[in-house]
Amino acid sequence: MDAAGDMAAIWTRRTSNAGDYHVESAVKPAGGALQPPEPRSPTTGNSDCNVDIHMTPGGNVTAMWDFNDTVNPTFVSYEDRSAPFASGTWGGAAKLSVPSVTSFAPAFSLDEHGDTAATWLAGGQLFSAVRRGSGGFTPAKALSGATGTSPGAVGASPTGDALAAFVGMSNGTDAIFGAHRGPTTDFGEVTPVATTPPGAVSLDSPDVALDDQGNGFAAWERNANNTYSVQVAGYDPVAPAISVLAVPAAGTAGQPVGMAATATDRMSGAAVHFDFGDGGGADGAGVTHVYGAAGAYTVTATATDGAGNRSSAAAVIQIAPAPAGGGGAGGGGGGGPKVTPSVAAVTSLTWDRLSSGSTRIKTLVLERLAGPEKVRLACLGRRLGCRKAATRTITRHGRKLSLTKYVKGMTLRPRAQITLTVTRPGYIARIFKYTMVNRRDPRKTTRCLAPGAKKSRTC
């Protein structure tokens, strides 16, 4: 059915005593009567009774079916009906599959632009082809190996993203596989969605659907020893949306600055991380930070959803020098309150993410040291991969300190932590913490500890 309420239908009907089935269709204008049936397939031959039909919001129709004309192996055909719907006509059937290979069980999607993504079975494999508008289809592309693949399912978003799902074999047992297609691309890499253990477990009847953003869901039937259930998996390719980034235009060194961001994600929610532009960072939708020196800093808020998709927004904050403390010339009183300066150190950590979920450390460097600073390096989690050499205290007078030789090659499991505490007498200390996360980048936080204070705070 299209946006105006026009309707098109397709079916198979037995039309001979020999039991042959032929393909027919009919249309119904909005508010009108169902028109007489029209044949879509030849009158000689037989259909395997696999038909599909879709319409665009504007009234274009595409139908697809399989048929055997008694001369060639079973093939897949399609036919388009033009718009506007009231005066539209069918344009004649064409073959989609390779004529020399038995092909059947077509499934396809049609987006609001009339772009088509189709799959069908041929020679024990699932094949696909796509097209723009009413143009020609791309050459057939195999989505599966030569296994006992079941018919697939295809769904599309209004804007052209498409998903294909099908049952194949993985290590000798049933598995659900999926492939994604962008608005102007062919189907990409096939990935496993769900597998089954050895034994009497089978999967069947997959189906897919997408929303207007391109997020999708797949559902299928699972049979374990005649106990049936429905399983569902989500597909989340869309990055979160950052609707609000609140960063003050100006601040003062040594004084806390508040910042906030609002991010949403339709599938899995979003976590926000702030990079303050001076090497510090913090997690959360609302944070505060203390800058240790004057200057212009670019603040970046990054939102990450449950699938690892990211989006960022940035703003610049101008930090003024800290006001002078104590009395003025001549020893007179007055003046503003004394502001405690902050250590201005920043850290840089690099790593490799391993397929096991662990993280292999490559380099660790401290910069913007003014000296003399005392640097306390610690790795927490001896049973999580920390080595003894990664815990030590160093006094540094220069601008840069490389700690790579103490941490390089450490393979840290999830929840292990690397911390760096940088202190200087009379200054607000900085505490950098990297927490290892399973199959994700390490999570970094930066906290400040004022002289004499017992508890640190986000900075």
Image (cartoon, grey):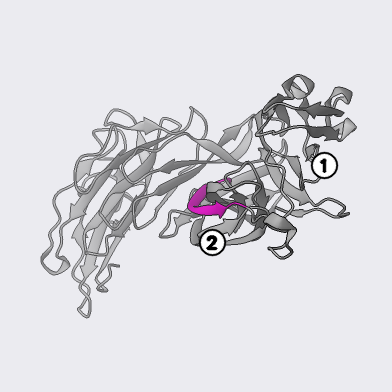
- The earlier-in-sequence mark between 2 and 1 is 2
Which residue is at a point 54% across and 47% down the rendered structure image?
295
**Residue 196: percent from the left, percent from the top?**
67, 40
For numbered disc 1, what is the local secondary structure?
Answer: loop
On residue 65, the disc is none
Residue bearing mark 2: 248
Q: Depth check: 98 or 309 in front?
A: 309
The answer to whether residue 192 is above or below residue 303 is above
Majority SS type along the magenta span: strand
Q: Is residue 37 left or right of residue 279?
A: left
Q: Which residues are magenta?
A: 308-321
Q: Depth check: 238 or 102 in front?
A: 238
Residue bearing mark 1: 425
Label 2: few (<14), some (14–19) or many (≥20) C-alpha neighbours in 10 Å: some
**Type of amino acid at the residue the image marks with label 2:** Pro
Could you tell me how far apart the alpha carbons at marks 2 and 1 are, in whole angstroms?
A: 30 Å
Q: Is residue 345 visible?
A: yes
Which residue is at a point 17% across and 66% down the rendered structure image?
85
Identity of the residue furthest to the front in this view:
330
**Type of amino acid at the residue the image marks with label 1:** Pro
Q: Is residue 15 visible?
A: no
Disc 2 versus disc 1: nearer the observer = 1
